[in-house]
Amino acid sequence: MQEGRQSRFHLFPGGVQCDYPLREQPHQLLSFGRGSPKMPSAFAYLTSEVDWCEGNFEHSEVIAEYYNTISSVSFFLLFPILLYLNHQYVQQRPLSAYSLSIMFLLIGIFSIYYHLTLSYVGQLLDELSILWTLALTYTVWIPKCYFPGFIKDRTQFVCLVGIATVVCTLMSFIKPTFNAYLLNSISLHLLYLTCQELKKCSNPRVHRIAAFMVMWWVLAISCWLSDKWFCGFWQRINFCYLHSFWHVLISIAILYCCPLFIYFDSRYEIPAFEPELEYWPSDSWPIALPYLALRTPYKRC
């Protein structure tokens, strides 16, 4: 927990009062209504094991982390943008496209709930939605050439990923803090696979989009780590918004990551079409979003 936060009087939703530093003692015994004090339930405010640098209830009596909650709305934009821009891919691979889009929507919902309440259940839902989204990404987008040697087909690979995901899910209940770092470590393996695919591709546009994806990811993870490790410094200069920046920056990184991954997926799984990466609204715009276009089918002899 972070240091240097002054004690203040707060009124929790439902009339629960406390006069201790919210950051330093979220697990103190609270009195809920009549009767003797009792430990708050896993759904109660401030029962999460992870707290971020932004002050609690500073801008609202019902929202624990105001800016972290508002910035989570950026995840909701991923659902319509990705489906609209990549509609040709959606027509060819509807199951993977819609399932991943729904997972992005769930990430947004659970992120808002977590930062709104800082509850233990909210923390678990937030982390598990990310974990299961990464697991789904592996099962639908990882090319067969990267399967372990003992895996014969995608069905076996799905089972392997499913078992690993269940184990990680159980770990979330044992050590939620460790699981947060594990989720970011998994993204390093996805970056490795991206580099392996780029070695097989000479298209400069693909390499440029990959470079932008990495740039946004580095900026995002830098904000995440800085908010986590250097909170005392950011509190001293009264700038505790880096985790909210993480939400926005990682959403932008995903808007570059998904077209890149479905480009690689199309080369393996939709061989009848020639995939090309384009920019919306136009290649000439200084700020544009990449998307996948499937061109005229190859002529077969």
Image (tube, rainbow, N blue to C red):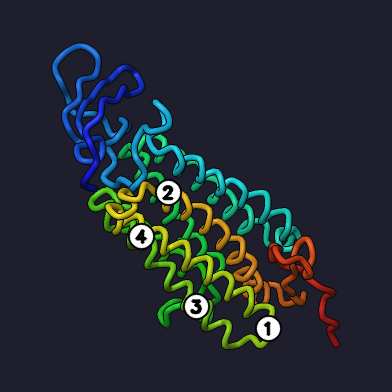
Q: CA distance from mark 3 to mark 1?
A: 18 Å
For badge 1, the amino acid type reads Pro
Q: Residues within 10 Å of mark 3 (few under 14, many from 20)?
A: some
Q: Which mark is residue 226?
A: 4
Is 83 above or below relative to 184? above
Q: Which quadrant of the figure has residue 120? A: top left
Disc marking residue 241: 2
Residue 250: image x %, image y %? 51, 58
Q: First in sequence: mark 1 or mark 2?
A: 1
| Image position, residue 113 (x, y; %) | 43, 37
Is residue 219 among the parts visible in the rendering?
yes
- For disc 4, the neighbor class at 10 Å (few under 14, some 14 to 19, many from 20) is some
Q: Nearer the viewer, mark 1 or mark 2?
A: 2
Q: Looking at the image, which residue is at 48% across and 56% down?
A: 133
From the image, which quarter does the C terminus lie in? bottom right
Q: Position of residue 205 (x, y in %)?
A: 69, 78
Q: Is residue 217 above or below residue 56?
A: below
Separation of residues labelled 3 and 2 (CA atoms): 32 Å
Q: Specify which label sits upstream in the sequence, 2 or 4.
A: 4
Which numbered disc flags the more N-terminal residue, 3 or 1? 3
Query: Disc 4 residue type?
Result: Ser
Q: Pick whichever of labels 4 and 1 is earlier in the sequence.
A: 1
Q: Which residue is mark 1?
A: 204
Question: Which is more N-terminal, label 4 or label 3?
Answer: 3
Q: Residue 42 appears in which quarter of the rendering?
A: top left
Please report whichever mark, 3 or 2, sits nearer to the chain's N-terminal start: 3
Residue ID for mark 3: 193
Residue depth check, mark 3 versus mark 4: number of the one nearer the observer:
4
In the image, farthest residue toward the top = 34
Q: Give the SS element for disc 2.
A: loop
Residue name at image x 37 percent, y 34 percent: 64
